[in-house]
Amino acid sequence: MHALALALDSVIADTRPLWRDWLDDAARRTHVELDVPEDRIEAAALLDERLGDWRPLLERFAADRGPVYVRPHGDTGTVLRRLHAAGARIGVFTDAPRELADIALAHAGAARRVEVVGTLDEVLAALGDGATVVHTRDELNAAAAVYHSGHGAH
């Protein structure tokens, strides 16, 4: 069984605009300066210090506004459905907080096909040796073509 580790933001749904707007909204609501690093894992640590329990705020904001920011890509959805149906294991890696990643996957229509979500290291550890890392939609299409040609599905 083949495994694919997909980059959330460049393959399935770009969560950065929603993240940035949430940061602006959170700063406005809490009156706390939220000049955080681009790396969202580092940003999360800083938010823990400055805001405390910020994750429910992000989750609510993303759930309310997700449909505006996250649109399914029909071609990507089709490829994911075909891969999943053919038995491929699919993981998604991101530096986004899990709450944001889960909402993006749901709105993109990919959540049911994804086995694991986390950092690249976490996803690769869960999927095991030999997982193909996919950074772009073009790479996803190429990996799917190789997968399907090797399994007799065209």
Image (cartoon, rainbow, N blue to C red):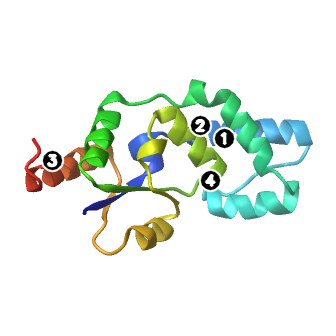
CB atoms of marks 1 and 2 within 8 Å: yes
Along the polypeptide, which appears first: circle 1 or circle 4?
A: 1
Which residue appears at 27% of the width and 53% of the height?
A: 87
Up-down relation of residue 73 to residue 99 (above or below): above
Q: Nearer the viewer, residue 131 or 69?
A: 131
Q: Residue 53 appears at what percent x and percent y?
A: 84, 54
Image x and y of residue 132, in percent:
29, 63
User: Which label belongs to residue 20?
Assistant: 1
Describe the element under mark 4 as helix, strand or loop: helix
- The quadrant of the rendering that contains the N terminus is bottom left
Q: Is residue 24 left or right of residue 119?
A: right
**Does residue 79 appear to the left or right of 150 in the view shown?**
right
Q: Secondary structure at mark 1?
A: helix
Q: Residue at x 57, y 47 (%)?
A: 101
- The Cα–Cα distance between marks 1 and 4, rounded to whole angstroms, is 16 Å
Distance between the alpha carbons at the discs numbered 3 and 2: 31 Å
Q: Nearer the viewer, mark 4 or mark 2?
A: 4
Q: Earlier in the sequence, mark 3 or mark 2?
A: 2
> What amino acid is labelled 3 in the image?
Ala
The image shows residue 47 at horizontal and vertical percentages of 79, 57
Which residue position holds label 4? Answer: 98
**Does residue 122 lie above or below 60 as drawn?**
below
Total marks shown come to: 4
Q: Residue furthest top?
A: 68
Looking at the image, the residue that sits furthest to the right is 31
* N-terminal label among 4 and 2: 2
Q: Which residue is mark 2?
A: 17
What label sits on residue 145 in the rendered view?
A: 3
Q: Is residue 106 left or right of residue 41?
A: left
* Between discs 1 and 3, the one toward the N terminus: 1
